[in-house]
Amino acid sequence: MSTPRKKRSWLLVAWFACTALAPPACCGPAHDPVVIGAAQDRYDHNRQTRVLEWSYQVRSEDGSPQPRTLNAGRLARDEAYTPFALPSVPSARTGEAADALPAAHLVPVFTGVPLPLPPTGGDPTGTRADLVDFLGTGPAAKAGVERPELQGALPDETARRYGAMLELLGSATLLANRAAVLAWAEAHGVVHSFDVADSRYQASSFADRVALREGAFWFVLFQLPAANGPPLGYSRLVVVPAGPLRQSPDKGPGS
């Protein structure tokens, strides 16, 4: 009789085979918005990197901001995102309530995986390998916060399946500006979208955002505004599972 782990292994292998053999979506703009939702669904940080400290502010009685720092020194696990987080995660209180629950919990909100990705063999933090592991677990794994016990199926095959995308994510030249990214997308027949609904930040927080559909995922690139001069290239990545793709041949994003 198969163990649950063996059953899961076969499910992952079957999922990978289906996505690897599926024909790529045609290039052009996508019509539906790309949604960056729950922390467990989105991949926005190397899950093996420890959170050393969280800095935040509280308001004193006179309204002035007071800095606070939480020294964590541990991985950001699932429990850090739940309403009943560990005692080491600070809580906000606005007054006593009948149910005694705090008004809020401070949880980690990551800006995304730093880009460009380090090269293969020159990645001491394991960021590239962790991304490949996430892609190999499949879009329904909800593994954006904590890696499951079973590693992503067939990591070498996953790296080959997403080889062109990994090449883009590791190239400062290709990530330099929107024109370069869109030229790459057209050359590889990749669907793109500028319509991104981000649950973490307002759109004005970034100079530009573009999402690229590859396989079972959207790869969302973020360009931060520069303090002086023109914006820098795309420097952050968030990966989210992709739903059914609908396209409009007549309209681009925002039309």
Image (spheres, rainbow, N blue to C red):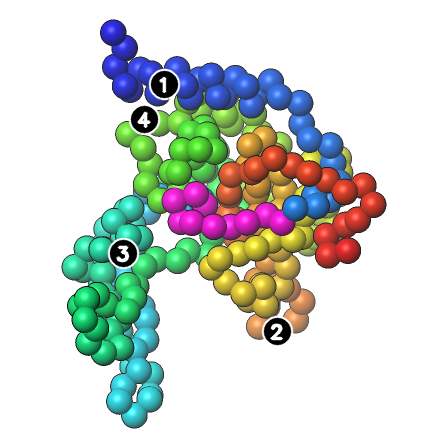
> Is 36 within the magenta?
yes
Is 208 on the left or on the right of 126, as rendered?
right
Give whichever of 84, 111 is nearer the camera. 84
Residue at x 56%, y 23% (from the top left corner): 19
| Label 4 secondary element | loop
Marks 3 and 1, how far apart in space?
Answer: 31 Å
User: Which numbered disc, 3 or 2, marks the residue that appears first in the sequence?
Assistant: 3
**Position of residue 33 measured from the top left corner of the image (x, y, whole percent):** 62, 49
Q: Which residue has dot 1 on it?
A: 9
CB under 8 Å between discs 3 and 4: no
Q: Which residue has dot 3 on it?
A: 83
User: Which numbered disc, 1 or 4, marks the residue that appears first in the sequence?
Assistant: 1
Eye-nearest disc, 1 or 2: 1
Q: Is residue 205 above or below residue 235?
A: below
Marks 3 and 4, how far apart in space?
Answer: 26 Å
Q: Which residue has dot 2 on it?
A: 228
> Is 120 within the magenta?
no
Question: Mark 3: which amino acid?
Answer: Pro
CB under 8 Å between discs 3 and 2: no
Residue at x 49%, y 57% (from the top left corner): 199
The tag on residue 80 is: none
Q: Is residue 133 above or below residue 77?
A: above
Q: Residues within 10 Å of mark 3 (few under 14, many from 20)?
A: few
